Image (cartoon, helix red, strand yellow):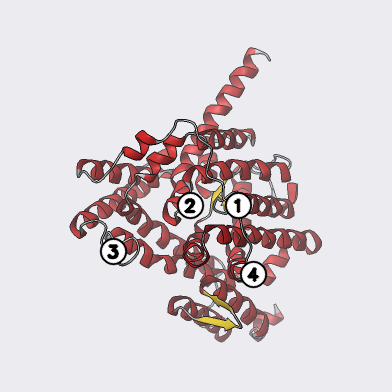
């Protein structure tokens, strides 16, 4: 290998580490909130990205990692069935991506717009964000389980608000690469404040080994968990289209045509299933990393390969996971009040960008029923099975969209 080639590889490795740094805050946030292992999330993010590149012929410069859309379902699943059964159900959600990939291959990308229009996807995404709001508030006030006061209320509110304000300020006022990592800054400031208040115990870090294998969970499969989790994949799968369109716009290449949306969906689905089979959260494309690609103008997919390699390498450092576990829940609560609200805003923007007329009877009915079911906690029992939450909202939205007749002027169009 010549000296220029070595220099090029070294530069790619450094930029790849920078891309992982951009994704790191959001990547580890999901396992820290849901009780999964942060090192495992790093491992599965790296492996998922490599699998995605394999499926797409290493043509698309995006990074895959922990999906926020699955936070509430994971929390519910872990409390109801345990981690192993939840992982089994999440592994099956990859089949939704694979089914959509096949559909796109056979009928073209436009089929997704017809089956999952904004009036279906928008309110479901809003419910994902709004459903998580109580969790964020509970953690912010020092009651992570909603009952037990783990931290004093005054200290909890102080830390969570300082964390939130820091994140807001970085997101709004900073420039360049800093603007892409407000979560990292918020966590850092909140952590330092907790350190000054004596709220952090470093013993787990001292006890952890430098090198250790990530915690692997063997999945178990239960029909009720699978049926509960399957519909939830619809919203992030459709969002995937937006992610591919965004990176296409940034790079000036139409990835919807080459390698093709069917291949990117397939890659995302395989990455999601693979992550869950190992005990990590489902993967999704990261807008933060797409923003970093736009900022740095580094369009080479090899950079994402390096980011994936770095994630896998770091996942084997036991002290990293131990350090992340010392972050107090009140810090995470401050971050989540912004993050979960922003998920709901994505749903709103989906409706706004598509110029959905919410006063039209058909659209009003779909959105109203979905919002009422989601916020009100509606559930439907079918024998021993129970469908509720985001799953029920997604199913109801799809059925109403297919059954309710469109307005005459829309039909003519």
- As measured in the structure, the alpha-carbon distance from the residue carrying label 2 to the one carrying label 3 is 21 Å
Q: Is residue 300 visible?
A: yes
Q: Residue at x 53, y 37 (%)?
A: 213
Considering only order in the chain, which callout, 2 or 1, is on the residue closer to the N terminus? 2
Which of the 4 image quarters holds residue 386?
bottom right
Determine whether label 1 and label 3 are within 8 Å by CB: no
The residue drawn where x is 63% and y is 16% is 4
Where does residue 166 sit, x and y in percent of width and height?
A: 30, 48
Question: Which residue lies at the image location 44% right of the left edge and 54% below the top edge?
Answer: 35
Q: Earlier in the sequence, mark 1 or mark 4?
A: 1
Q: Are marks 4 and 3 in contact (CB under 8 Å)?
A: no
| Residue with the mark numbered 2 | 36
- Label annotation for residue 218: 1
Q: Quadrant of the C terminus?
A: bottom right
Mark 2 / mark 3, whichever is N-terminal: 2
Q: Is residue 182 above or below residue 412?
A: above
Measured in 3D between alpha carbons, the distance from the residue under mark 1 to the one under mark 2, in whole angstroms, is 13 Å
Q: Secondary structure at mark 1?
A: loop
Q: Is residue 7 left or right of residue 156?
A: right
Q: Give whichever of 341, 267 is nearer the camera.
A: 267
- Which quarter of the figure is the N terminus placed in? top right
Q: Disc 4 on helix, strand or loop?
A: helix
- The local crowd at label 3, few if under 14, some if 14 to 19, many if 20 or more residues have their Cα within 10 Å, is few
Q: Spatial distance from mark 1 to mark 4, Cα to Cα? A: 17 Å
Q: Nearer the viewer, residue 168 or 228?
A: 228
Pointer 1 or 3: first along the chain? 3
Q: Which mark is residue 148?
A: 3
Label 2 vs label 4: CA separation? 22 Å
């Amino acid at each position: 290998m010549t000296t220029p080639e070595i220099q090029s590889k070294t530069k790619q490795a450094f930029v790849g580490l920078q891309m992982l740094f951009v994704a790191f805050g959001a990547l580890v946030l999901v396992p820290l909130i849901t009780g999964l292992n942060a090192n495992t999330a790093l491992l599965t993010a790296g492996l998922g990205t490599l699998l995605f590149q394999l499926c797409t012929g290493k043509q698309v410069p995006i990074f895959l990692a922990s999906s926020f859309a699955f936070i509430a379902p994971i929390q519910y699943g872990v409390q109801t069935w345990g981690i192993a059964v939840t992982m089994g159900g999440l592994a099956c959600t990859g089949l939704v991506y694979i089914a959509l990939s096949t559909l796109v291959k056979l009928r073209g990308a436009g089929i997704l717009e017809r089956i999952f229009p904004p009036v279906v996807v928008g309110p479901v995404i809003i419910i994902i964000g709004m459903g998580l709001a109580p969790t964020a508030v509970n953690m912010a006030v020092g009651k992570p389980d909603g009952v037990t006061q783990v931290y004093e209320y005054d200290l909890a509110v102080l830390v969570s608000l300082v964390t939130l304000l820091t994140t807001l300020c970085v997101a709004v006022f900073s420039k360049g690469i800093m603007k892409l990592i407000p979560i990292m800054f918020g966590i850092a400031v909140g952590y330092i404040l907790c350190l000054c208040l004596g709220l952090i115990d470093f013993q787990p870090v001292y006890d952890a080994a430098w090198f250790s294998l990530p915690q692997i969970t063997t999945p178990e499969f239960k029909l009720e968990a699978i049926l509960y989790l399957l519909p939830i994949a619809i919203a992030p799968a459709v969002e995937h289209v937006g992610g591919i369109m965004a990176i296409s716009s940034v790079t000036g290449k139409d990835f919807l045509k080459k390698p093709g949306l069917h291949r990117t969906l397939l890659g995302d689905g395989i990455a999601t299933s693979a992550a869950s089979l190992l005990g990590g959260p489902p993967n999704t494309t990261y807008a933060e990393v797409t923003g970093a690609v736009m900022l740095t103008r580094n369009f080479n997919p090899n950079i994402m390969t390096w980011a994936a390699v770095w994630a896998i390498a770091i996942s084997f450092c036991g002290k990293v996971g131990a350090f992340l576990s010392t972050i107090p829940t009140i810090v995470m609560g401050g971050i989540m009040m912004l993050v979960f609200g922003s998920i709901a805003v994505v749903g709103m923007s989906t409706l706004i960008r598509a110029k959905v007329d919410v006063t039209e009877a058909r659209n009003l009915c779909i959105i109203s029923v979905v919002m009422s079911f989601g916020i009100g906690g509606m559930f439907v029992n079918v024998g021993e099975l129970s469908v509720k939450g985001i799953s029920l909202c997604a199913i109801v939205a799809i059925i109403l969209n297919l059954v309710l007749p469109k307005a005459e002027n829309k039909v003519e169009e």
